[in-house]
Image: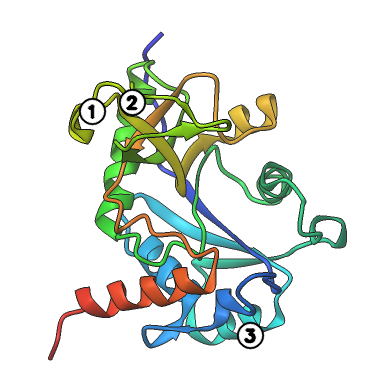
Amino acid sequence: MPGTVNKAHLTALLPMRHHSQRVPGKNYRNFAGKPLYRHAVDALLGARGIVRVVIDTDSPVIRDDCRVNYDERVLLLERPEHLRVPDVPMNDILLNDIGQVDGEYFLQTHATNPLLRTATIEAAIARYFDCLAAGECDSLFSVTLRQVRIWGTGAKPLNHDPAVLMQTQDLVPFYEENSCLYLFSASILRQRKNRIGAKPMMFEMDPLEAVDIDEETDFVLAEVLANQRMPTH
């Protein structure tokens, strides 16, 4: 049933590993004038509704830089050894984090989404708490709309008929989970061992803002976009 939601304490979680297999040192590498991870931290700290940012990391570089550039609103957590392996599930890391931090509501993003705007974070927070209060969702995750011809293995068309060449804007849309934003409660994460609940809301984002850095080419493209949108003086 819909009810009152206490949204006074929303904590942002920003997990980061020291090593990156495909883009070495990417989380603390210079990106458009400052270390990559700081773009995410600054966007989060500027958002209404976020009371603190928790950085879970095994990186001495990130920890040292944080201590110099941020105040008590940024909390550093040392990632334990058993959660440092490359294939550890993100949900396990998040469960470890919320076990050390007070609060019921959490937002998680990645340092590899440096074009994420404060205004978008605030819009997602507002949407999440509105739908939560109305009983319409139990979590939120961000998506990118894709209206393109999708093919499966064996050249099997998944969302179109090759014999009917429809315009792409008329195709059934697909939504890609873009890993930019997740909003959830501690209770949902603990119950399901998953940041996405049984009744999630999809939050659509601008594809350019949702650029995620997985490869070196992504880093180059994202930095070009970041420099392009920065105001000139």
Check disc 3: other Cα within 10 Å, few if <14, some if 14-19, many if 20+: few
Residue at 44 percent across and 25 percent down: it is 158
At label 3, the amino acid type is Asp
Q: In which quarter of the view is residue 29 placed?
A: bottom right
Q: Which residue is mark 1?
A: 165
Q: Quarter of the image for the N terminus: give it.
A: top left
Considering depth in this image, is 104 or 114 the residue closer to the camera? 114
Amino acid found under the numbered disc labelled 2: Pro
Residue 22 picture quarter: bottom right
- The residue singled out by tag 2 in the image is 162
Image position of 180 with respect to 57: above or below: above
Could you tell me residue 228's position as x and y percent?
22, 77
Q: Residue at x 42, y 77 (%)?
A: 220
Query: Where is residue 12 drawn, in percent x and y?
Result: 49, 53
Q: Are marks 2 and 3 in contact (CB under 8 Å)?
A: no
Q: Secondary structure at mark 2?
A: loop
Q: Earlier in the sequence, mark 1 or mark 3?
A: 3
- What residue is shown with label 3? 64
Most foreground residue, 126 or 26 = 26
Q: Give SS at disc 1.
A: loop
Whether residue 227 is situated above or below residue 135 in the rendered picture: below
The reply to whether discs 2 and 1 touch (Cβ–Cβ < 8 Å) is: yes
- Furthest residue to the front? 163
Secondary structure at badge 3 equals helix
Q: Quadrant of residue 230?
A: bottom left
Lateral position of residue 64 relative to residue 230, left or right = right
The single residue placed furthest to the top in the displayed view is 1
